[in-house]
Amino acid sequence: MRRFLAASVVCGVVVSAVTIASAILLAYVVSGVITDPTSRTLEHWLPALAALAGLWTVRAIAQWAQGRLSQRGATAVIADLAAQVLRTVTALPPRHLAAERDAAAVVVSRGLDGLRPYFVNYLPAVLLAGILTPAAVVAIAAVDWRSALIVVIVLPLIPIFMILIGLVTKDRSTAALAAMTTLQSRLLDLIAGLPTLRALDRAAGSTGRIAELSAAHRRSTMSTLRITFMSALVLELLATLGVALVAVGVGLRLVFGETTLFAALAALLLAPEVFWPLRRVGAEFHAAQDGKTAADRAFALLQAGPAPPRGTRTVTAAGAPIHLQALDADIQAGRVTVLTGRNGCGKSTVLQTILGLTDLGGRVTVGGVDVAELDPEHWWEQIAWLPHRPVLIPGTVRANLELFGPLSDLETACRQSGFDDVLASLPEGLDTALGRDGIGLSLGQRQRLGLARIFGSPAAVLLLDEPTAHLDAALESRVLAAIAARARAGATVLVVGHRDSVLSVGDEVVRMGVETLAEH
């Protein structure tokens, strides 16, 4: 944003200089027409009027350029900050990601858009106030020091009230953002679970809570608006009072012959320019505060979850053993290793640690190389991962099957996973469109789609988290046989499970919570 701010400062200097020059020139023209009857011809004042028109044109162009630069700068800053938040939050370990997901979604999708008024309106107003206000005071002092004294006395009242109002508004904006975050997360959860709620005839159960959250957000917004209107009234009153005092002072001194008409008009025309930038700052402050609050939240997300350092080393996963120091276990190629244990003991975390997504506590090496030192992209290309809940995106069935790359043998993969029966039941087969999180498929069908994605992958390492969940006994046997076949073909296979049928297919069983490595 620095170069945009620098250009905006230049535009602000031009606007300030032109504003003061045009006010003085206008006072000169008007006072001359009134006090010099011999000069009341258009030809006499034509050069001055042309110069005045030129100054106004320059001011309009400078203000347009400032607005355009601010828009471009705001767009660039918002896009860059949103990208940083997305990169940082999505790089968090899965558990931390779940905690920050809703806040990040609100900040990126809606909150940062509030920065546009901050950069486009508020920041230029602050710059203009820092340039035009003191310059206008100096110009008034040059023509009428008494008017400048009045302005200097009244002027500090505006920043004082702005600070007081800003302290209240900041708390209101923070509360509004928190209410919006809670409301949006509740709505997203409700929409995601709506099919299940409808199936259980409980869809109306959450409407009361959603209505309460909506009412809380509405009350917070209306409270902020009330403060906005009241602050605008106070600032306008102070600015009007300051200009009125200048007008009364120059009027009385003009009546008693203590000043010239030119000085009086110049002071009167310049007085509003002293207060106008500050009034604009106050008016734009409230519109910009929501965006600034969202930006503060974005910076908090960036500081709370710095992107982990990316390794640069590479390793060939085919045939390379994976050693888990925390479990004192080796996952060998060509064998099926089953990881079992009670619920919540961290079995899924082990898979995420092998992927480099989280830290189990203890080194994880592949062929002797620490996973933390590996280039993630190169490492992930060699892994096929089936999480406990397979990831599905809005799109066609084919797009979901090939989400992580083209499948080597789609037909065989669908047959081994049992997804061929699902395809036969879909109205458009592979071209059938799915909704968010695979809406249109049952849990068992989603599991089969995820398995087809794994079986069709040429990856050398297979990480499977409860692969037979939601499958009947016959299909479970087929899937486990396909998993064993991949291991016999040389793949490194690690399966998380606790059912006897899953344990029976394992060449080795690692029991978490019990320090034993048993041959099965």
Image (cartoon, rainbow, N blue to C red):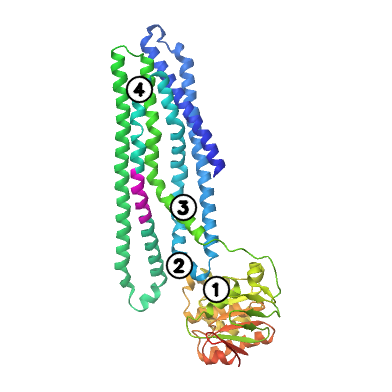
Front of the two marks 2 and 1: 2
First along the sequence among labels 4 and 1: 4
Rendering quarter of residue 190? bottom left
Secondary structure beneath dot 1 equals helix
Q: CA distance from mark 2 to mark 1?
A: 30 Å
Q: Which numbered circle lies on residue 397?
A: 1
Foreground mark, 2 or 4? 4
Query: Which residue sits at x=46%, y=11%?
Result: 43
Q: Can see residue 356?
A: yes
Q: Quadrant of residue 268?
A: top left
Query: For residue 99, which numbered disc appears in the image?
Result: 2
Amino acid under label 3?
Answer: Ala
Reply yes or no: does residue 146 show up in magenta.
no
Label 3 to label 2: alpha-carbon separation: 19 Å
Classify 221 as above or below 368. above
Secondary structure, mark 4, is helix
Whether residues under marks 2 and 4 lie with C-beta atoms below 8 angstroms apart, the answer is: no
Name the residue carrying label 4: 147
| Mark 3 crowd level (few <14, some 14–19, many ≥20, 10 Å Cα) | many
Upstream in sequence: badge 1 or badge 3? 3
